[in-house]
Each structure stands twice: as structure tokens, then as C-alpha cells.
Image (cartoon, rainbow, N blue to C red):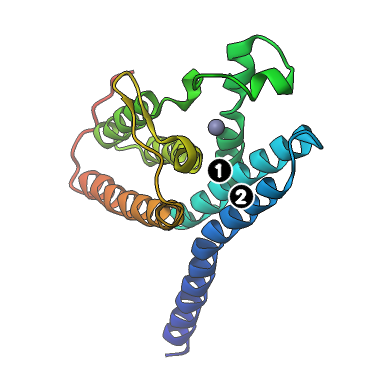
Amino acid sequence: MWKLWSLDYLKTKLDIKSTINLFLIPAIALTGDKVIDYIFPYKSLILKCFIDSATHFIIASLSWNYVGNLSIYKRTHLFAVFMCGLLASLIDIDHFIAVGTMNLQVATTLPHRPFLHCTTVFSAIAVLLALLSIKMHSIPYLKLSLIITTAIWTHHWRDGYRRGIWICPIGSTPPYWYFLYLVGLVALPLSLHFVLRFTSELINKAKNQGLQPVYFI
Ligand SMILES: [Zn+2]
């Protein structure tokens, strides 16, 4: 009885923590965007870029912390949270690669969007990896695919409210309403958490039924 009660208590505690985590995502985005709006680029472009990068990092980290909170391995989970944030903030490195210089002024005034901002390619890679994980009965591959999706989509979705989503080679969607962007930041981890749970159960079921995994590599 005590055990059951404590399990229920733990579950409620986790649910409250997860809900706070989930709603912290749009709150951080809102704060980051407002701070950036108040920093004039001619005063401190480096500070503006740093806050922008840090906002991408925190949003992606919190999102993965929500998506992957089923993990029982806390250290591995925290490492994944950090890596997801790092991946999301490193995407903007393509600005420097595209202009071939580390000059911030030149990199931030690029007339077109650089290659790491193409949503189609990374989404296709993540979907392929997810399909591979199902075939190979591999939860780590599934998580890797969802970490990539979380990092890429949180970054592109945040950039997108100003510039739209770049579906290369077709073109770009128009920029969207700020409120929709905030709603999307909550909907994304919610949906990916569902995908992780559903697909993990599918893989575990296949394992329990003794179905043989298919190895491609
Ligand atoms: Zn960007």
C-alpha cells in the first residue's frame, strides 16, 4: 500500500516537474527574443549573438529533457540533454562557413539562408534513422533520431517566425504568427515524447515476440 502510494506520489511529482519543464520552453523563448530585441546590434552584436545562441541551446535542452525523460539512466539522459542543446546552438555555424570568415558583421548579414537551415534534409535523415531503429530494434538509434529532430526543429522553428521554414529545394513557408511559434514550442516536445513512447513500445514488443532484427550495417 505504502509502495503504491509512494509510486503514485513519484509519478505526480514527475508530472508536475515535466509540466513546468514544458512551459518553461516558451517562457525562455519569449525572454530570449525580448532581450535580443532590446540589444541594439551596433552596440553589442557579439552579446546579441551570444544570447541568441544561448536561447537556442536552452530551448533544445529543455525540449529533450521533456521528450526523453523516460530514461532511467540519469547521466546518459543529462549528456543527451546537453548534446541536443549544443547541436541546436551549433547550427548557426553555417553562417560563418557560407561567408568563409569569422567576422560576425559579415556572417549575420548573409542575404540567403545557409545549408544547415534546410529543414528537409535533416528531417529526412531523422526519419530514415527512426525507420532503421525500428528494423534493428534499437532504442539508442531511435533516441538519436529524435535528438536530431528536437535540435533541428526547435532551432528552425524559432528562426521561422521571422523567416519561415526553408523546405529546400521547394522554397520557404511565409513567416508565422508569434503566438503560433510559442504554441509550436510546446507542441513539438509533446508530440516527440509521444513518438518516443509509441515507437519504444513497438520495438520492445517486437523484441518480446522474438522477431529477428534486420541489420543494414
Ligand atoms: Zn539559425
Q: Residues within 10 Å of mark 2 (few under 14, many from 20)?
A: some
| Amino acid type at mark 1 | Ala
Instruction: Mark 2 and ligand 1: say if the CB distance to the nearest ligand atom is below 8 Å.
Output: no
Q: Residues within 10 Å of mark 1 (few under 14, many from 20)?
A: some
Instruction: Mark 1 and ligand 1: say if the CB distance to the nearest ligand atom is below 8 Å.
Output: no
Mark pair 2, 1: CA separation: 25 Å
- Residue at image mark 2: 33
Among the two numbered marks 2 and 1 on one chain, the one whose residue lies closer to the N terminus: 2
180 relative to 20 in the view: left or right: left
| Amino acid type at mark 2 | Asp
Residue 114: x, y in percent? Answer: 51, 19
100 and 110: which is toward the camera: 110
For the N terminus, the quadrant is: bottom left
179 and 64: which is toward the camera: 179
Residue 123: x, y in percent? Answer: 35, 31
> Which type of secondary structure does the marked residue at label 1 adopt?
helix
4 relative to 132 in the view: left or right: right
The extreme right residue here reads 43
- Residue at image mark 1: 80
Residue 34: x, y in percent? Answer: 64, 53
Q: Residue at x 47, y 26 (%)?
A: 117
Q: Residue at x 46, y 56 (%)?
A: 182
- Number of marks drawn: 2
